[in-house]
Image (spheres, grey):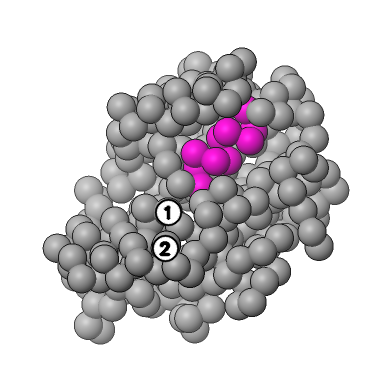
Amino acid sequence: MTWSTAQIPDLSGRWAMVTGASSGLGHHVTRELAHAGAAVVMAGRDLDRLAVSADLVRRGVPAADLHIVSLDLADLAAVHRTAEQVLEGYDHLDLLVDNAGVMATPERKTADGFELQIGTNHLGHFALTGLLLPALLASPHGARVVVTSSVAHRTVSGIDLDSLVAGADTRPYRKWRAYGESKLANLLFMLELERRAAAEDLALLSVAAHPGYAATELQTSGPAMGGATVGSRLMSLANKVVAQPADHGAWPLLLAATQPGLPGGSYVGPGGPGETRGR
């Protein structure tokens, strides 16, 4: 299937929320949703970076209706505060794109004691989505949740629940295994949310997408957290030589977010070699 952003339908009157909207995939998803007429709530840890991202979007889409909220997925109390702010400020949401994440970080824990990658990539989004269900179910159009996963979910055979709590896992910490488990958790969450919504006949569609290999800060920020300058430089080089541009990586997310008639439980990704690039 060949797809482009020209196929995004008119989204005038729709409200969307995108996590990790300050850069990379989240920035490009925000831009295209705004271009199609949606009002977008941009969520991220750094309000200054979100403001810069919003200004860049407005350069190409002067009429963009953008709103900024602080969101720290590695702190569940902060997630609650963000959800309360959104519920108080907006009477409904039509679309939630759970996009933010970390990758291949050194062994660290969230504010609540969970392993950082699964705590941020899965548990934070799990909590946010659940807390925002009242706004999603209030959508007059029927709402959609898009969860961002990765082909890395195929590198693990399951999730060791001991790995949820930092330091409780008896296995040596492996940053790529932890990342793969977090991405598998994303998919399982999406499928269960879709199953439950369908069983209750709720107007809520849940789907997932992965970007393939796209050049974003995700590849370099994780290794850099641990002072792994060589690893960070190698990933930076791979971004330049191998990866597709970040805007192309956003296409599967945008298709998942906007394609009419997309079945619940769908998993969208590039069709090129190794599912790393393409349309």
Q: Position of residue 273 (x, y in %)?
A: 64, 77
Q: Is residue 24 left or right of residue 94?
A: left
The quadrant in which residue 102 appears is bottom left
In the image, 142 versus 276, the foreground residue is 276
Instruction: Identify which residue is drawn at 66% across, 28% down.
Output: 35
Tell me the magenta residue range: 25-34
Element type where label 1 sits in the image: loop
| Main secondary-structure element of the magenta-colored stretch | helix
State how far apart marks 1 and 2 are (Cα).
Answer: 8 Å
Q: Residues within 10 Å of mark 2 (few under 14, many from 20)?
A: many
Q: Position of residue 2 (x, y in %)?
A: 79, 59
Q: Are marks 1 and 2 in contact (CB under 8 Å)?
A: yes
Q: Is residue 26 magenta?
A: yes
- Above-or-below relation of 40 to 144: above
Q: Would you name the residue on which mark 2 appears?
A: 239
Q: Would you name the residue on which mark 1 appears?
A: 216
